[in-house]
Amino acid sequence: MTASGKVVGPGAGAAICTIPAVSLPAGFYSVQMLALYGAAAGVDFDVQLQVQGAAQFTLPIGGAVDTGTGGIAEVILKFNGLQNLSLNAIAGNGAGVYMGLLIATKIRI
């Protein structure tokens, strides 16, 4: 499953992209994520991977406008079939442009 998104001027906790629970049946998933800032800078380390609203991982991304590298990470997570997966701004930035991509690949039941 994949999700991508772009948010201009996100507030604290704003979702950048989300994979809904219905798309994540119970099991283990390899979750790859990419976050970067667009035309306006964001805040250092301000993008977080969340499962059903609970923080799992903060992406290593600096606050400057990105030149194409962004914060990239991969984690293995277990889902119970009732949880969504999202990239969220932590503090947010009224002037920032936040972009994100999530890829969740089921690796075992």
Image (cartoon, rainbow, N blue to C red):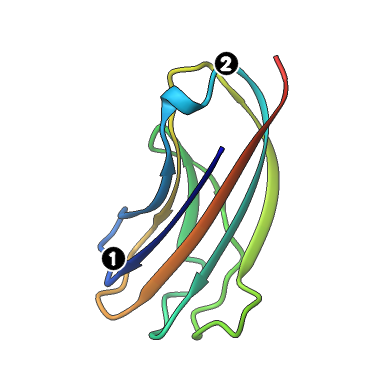
Depth check: 7 or 57 in front? 7
| 17 to 27, vertically: above or below | below
Instruction: Where is residue 96? Give x, y as percent.
Output: 34, 77
Q: Read off the residue under disc 1.
A: 10
| 26 to 41, vertically: above or below | above
Q: In which quarter of the image is the C terminus?
A: top right
Tell me what residue is drawn at x 27 percent, y 72 percent: 9
Q: Which of marks 2 and 1 is nearer the N terminus?
A: 1
Q: Residues within 10 Å of mark 1 (few under 14, many from 20)?
A: many
Instruction: Where is residue 64? Give x, y as percent.
Output: 51, 85
Tell me what residue is drawn at x 49 percent, y 85 percent: 65
| SS assignment at label 1 | loop
Instruction: Where is residue 62? Give x, y as percent.
Output: 56, 77
In the picture, residue 92 is in which quadrant?
Answer: bottom left
Q: Which of marks 2 and 1 is in front?
A: 2
Residue extending farthest right: 107
Q: How crowded is mark 2: few (under 14 residues within 10 Å), some or many (20 or more)?
A: some
Q: Read off the residue under disc 2.
A: 26
Tell me what residue is drawn at x 49 percent, y 60 percent: 100
| Pointers 2 and 1 in contact (C-beta within 8 Å) | no
Instruction: Where is residue 19? Give x, y as percent.
Output: 45, 38
| SS assignment at label 2 | loop
